[in-house]
Image (spheres, rainbow, N blue to C red):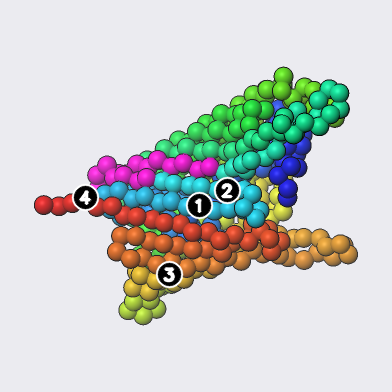
Amino acid sequence: MKKSTFLSFILLCFVQLSFGQAPKYSNEFLSIGVGARALGMSGANVALTNDATSAYWNPAGLVLKEGDLQLSLMHNEYFAGIGKFDYGTLAIPIDNTRAVGVSVIRFAVDDIPDTIDLIDKDGNINYDRLRSFSTADYAFLFTYSKKTSKEGLRYGGNVKVIHRKVGEFANAWGFGLDLGAQFEHKNWTFGAMGKDITSTFNAWSYNTERLKDVFAVTGNELPENGIEVTLPKVIVGAAYNIQLTEKIFATPEIDLDLTFDGKRNTVVQSDVVSIEPHGGVEFSYDNFLFLRAGVGNIQEETNITGSESTTAQPNIGVGVKIKNVSIDYALTNIGSDESLYSNVFSLKWNIFKKTE
């Protein structure tokens, strides 16, 4: 996809966003996922997550993070480098039963040509009038996690602030809440995560003075300031820890994503709820070397001949932990096109205070 096509696409989409409806795909940059460990397992992580990335996957797991501080970072690129995804979390313990975290997520397309003023009123092309802009989505997560007095039970929550900006044409601010819980019993771990439990509301405002001329020429109505709503989503999952040898463990997990915004192309679908299963497994050797695989995005597709087939998205990953530093890699695909494969690297650093 060429950058020059983004401007027309973005401006036309504004009309759909301005009516305060609840579209199926709102704030979708928060559905991509963070951390190569989880992405290598196709996002099946609501039960297993136990580090700084728990702020995204399930805030209940944040309290299990190692170190006096834990820093997690990730950079990823999509669409041949056009879209850039950056993420970072700093997790800090309060005491042995509580922890907090601060996370920043950014998904952006930069250096998009702004051709609105390229042609003057006399029809002359003036490349000196050519500018560029960025369209960027930001999320700021403030996480709290706590172990309860019941052994194996913990919970957590996020307060998240959303900021979306499209150059000088439009911007939005939003606010939402997430809640999560985990429970361990013997070799089992269960997890549940309610995303946008109160719905997340993005208030959009548009620079209509900047847009009115091009919208008049193209025959489109100017967008009006309005509210975009992200409806709640529930994720439940279960993981089981299997000891294969003295040093080798296997931990599979299966998650179910439940959405309530109408029928989706998922394994289980209805007008009330749609359910999308995805699963993965992590093999570990001596808590040093890790191998991961998963499958998700299971859909029914219709090809050009009219016949239907079931497709799925496989993912794989590896990781290594050296002392207090973990480096993880995942090969993922966000679609059926080979050009959408992405190499994901993430870093986790456990920081300990010096002792006398």
- Up/down of 226 relative to 324, above or below: above
Q: Which residues are magenta?
A: 90-106
**Mark 3, residue position:** 290
Q: Amino acid at mark 2?
A: Lys
Q: Is residue 142 above or below residue 154?
A: above
Q: Residue furthest top?
A: 209
In the rendered image, residue 115, in percent from the top left (x then y), is placed at 75, 33
In the rendered image, residue 23 lying in the magenta stretch gets the answer no
> Which residue shows up at 43% across the image and 51% down it?
73
Q: CA distance from mark 1 to mark 4?
A: 27 Å
Distance from disc 1 to disc 3, alpha carbons, whole Å, reads 20 Å
Q: Secondary structure at mark 3?
A: strand
Look at mark 4 in the image and give the residue it sits on: 353
**Residue at the spot 56% in from the left edge and 64% down from the top edge:** 331
Secondary structure, magenta segment, majority class? strand
Neighbour class for label 4 at 10 Å: few (<14), some, many (≥20)? few
Task: Locate residue 23 relative to residue 66 in the image: left or right.
Answer: right
**For the residues bearing labels 1 and 2, Cβ distance under 8 angstroms:** yes
Of labels 2 and 4, earlier in sequence is 2
The answer to which image quadrant residue 314 occupies is bottom right
Q: Earlier in the sequence, mark 1 or mark 4?
A: 1
Dot 2, crowdedness within 10 Å: few (<14), some or many (≥20)? some
Q: Amino acid at mark 1?
A: His
